[in-house]
Image (tube, coloured by chain):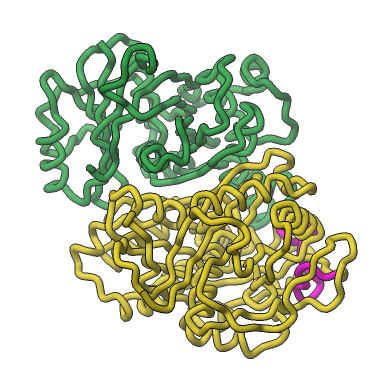
Amino acid sequence: MTPFSPPLTIQALGDFYRTIDPDRGPDPLRETLAAVSRERFRRIDRYTQLALIGSGRCVGDTGLASDTGLYIGSRFASLSNTITVHQQMVAGGSVPKPANFINTLSNSAGYYVARNLGLDGRNLFVSRQDASLIAALQLAVADLAGGSIRQALVGVVDESSMPLEEHRRRLDVAPGTPLGEGSHWFRVSPHNRRASAEDSEPGLATLSHLATLANEEALSDWMEEASADGAGIWWPEQDTDLPAPVAHLPRYQAGLACYPAAMGGAIVRYLEGGQQHPLLLLAPDGANRYHGVRLNPAR
Amino acid sequence: MARQARIAATGMISSLGRGVADSVRTLMATPERQAGQLVLAGFDEPLSVPYHGVEGGPDDAGERLAWLLDQALAELFERAPLSASQRAGMPVFIGSSCYGIGMGESRYRQQLAQSPASAMPLPLDGFGQISRHLQMQHGLTGPDFSLNTACTATANALLGALTAIRNGQCDRALVVGLEARNHTTLSGFHGMQLMATDTMRPFDRRRDGLVLGEGCGVLLLEADSVDSGACYLAGGASNCDTYSISASHPDGSSIASVMAAALADAGIAGERILAIKAHGTATPLNDTSEAAGMRRLFHELPDFFSLKSALGHTLGSCGVMETILMEACLGQNRLPASTGFAEADDALQVAPMTAGREAEDGSYLLNFFGFGGNNASLVLNRRSGP
């Protein structure tokens, strides 16, 4: 068994993405949320709104089985709410308000998504910088292989915050870099090559070769296994310097601004664009490691 | 025989002591621990909270986080001196409620003092701070999972490590839990009016809330197909109760459900549970739901106790820190008393152990519940010989 197998079949996807207008800032989400959420929630923050919108668009009217696991990845989780709490507490000397404090907990969004979709099973939040989607998928694969769940709803969610120049410093990107935010969701199940057409949904694509790579040498080894004829590469779009082992591959760019959840947005856009070739997606984590996955569109 | 997950080595630092043995010694010897009072500076009104903090260590938030991790890991690596390649290859499951939030507070406070015009809240990537330290200082460069599910974070980390070992994804996995003092958490719980006046009294009629605790616990789980004498993580489960974001359903149904799922995962019947380490936060709501859940599942309730009155509530790291204490107690064939309890609450219809007692080989259930509806139960199986 390879560390993170079997491959996953993407049965459904859905998301929300916006490039942030430097003058207006992030758009209000209330109407977008009302159109997709099954329940109306009070006192939720923007991060939870994003999670509800993306997951709601992925699931639609489908009923999910109770043995569905929920996995949310994010670099910053409830960013704007936590910023407010720190401004009030550190700069203003105020004790956090209970609703604000509760929303700083990273798994608050998971609670509301579970409640909205009627899920009561495994419900995890995980963070790994810009590779948080990979971490969430790795957890889902392990639980699927172990049999504690039958399918998984996996999302990656990161919000932007104002002022943008401050958020660029937080992300350690160049002044003026366009910023975005997004909530990208996938309903996945174990890929079963031997399943008959009657007992398995065909799926939109498979995700395979999930890996955490300690250095460039490990990335080269992974490339030998994961690469395929016609495969392209996705790497954070504002970063011009691809790692040497993948620099020769045709680069796919989804037209996304800079935000930590961008890998999820690239997967959605690649599939919605009708692409046929495999796509390798890689994210660095600021500590010399790489985190990768291969996307194989269904033909 | 299926792959089993043996607790191969542990390390911890807590308000009870430096090292596992020291912590267990204090736990067993102290009938009731009084928390200290921690004064939080920088608030409009004077604010002091009861706290089970770790003695000593640096005051700087970043240095303290690193110190807590290094202390606990030094103990673990002394018991299990892993090679560089073994360290580099194993997955690391991290759980915490704070991660680098204290570092973010501290840096923002410094910026406000030095150059307020350019001061920026949350100036760093808090979730990555523990993992980065583990990579840079300890060579732990394998897949890392920084989990945050409130007070079940390291219970879920233990479940993740157990699953990876059972699946054959790895032969060993490290679980890391850390809770370092910070103003966000302490003032947040104060604002929610969840803090005890002075001491925690789990399941007691007079209980009035919790006392937070500081510490770090690390646990190495290894695959073991030999039926040897050791403590095994035999199974577990987690679920999400959507009754309320801040409390489990008071009828105990979701808590009974997660305990039943943990027993099923471990392949044992409830009658074989010798004792329960309750979550036991001494808040009115938690203890009501947990008591109802235990009554609902067990026809005859096993002995149970809470460790939090002695250790403090270490939030996201309580899963691994309390598991480490349990493993060490079972290694001495002893169970601790549930400190802080004296007067039964008729509404709960249950009462915890008021004295320590001998522990036999067999299975023990450990409960952990958190905000966001997250519930987890683990089963430990202690065998003193093959």
Residue occupying the point 48% across, 55% down: B235
Residue occupying the point 42% across, 58% down: B129
| Residue A184 pos. (x, y %) | 45, 26
How many discs appear? 0
The residue closer to the viewer here, A2 or B224, is B224
Residue B54 occupies quadrant: bottom right
- Location of the C terminus of chain B by quadrant is bottom left
Residue B124 visible in this rendered orientation of the protein? no
Bounds of the magenta segment: B189-204
The residue closer to the viewer here, B365 or A160, is B365
Q: Colour of chain B?
A: yellow
| Relative horizontal placement of residue A267, taking residue B355 as reference (left or right) | left
| Residue A285 pos. (x, y %) | 31, 46
Residue occupying the point 76% across, 78% down: B340
Magenta span: helix, strand or loop, mainly?
A: loop
| Relative horizontal placement of residue A209, taking residue B304 as reference (left or right) | left
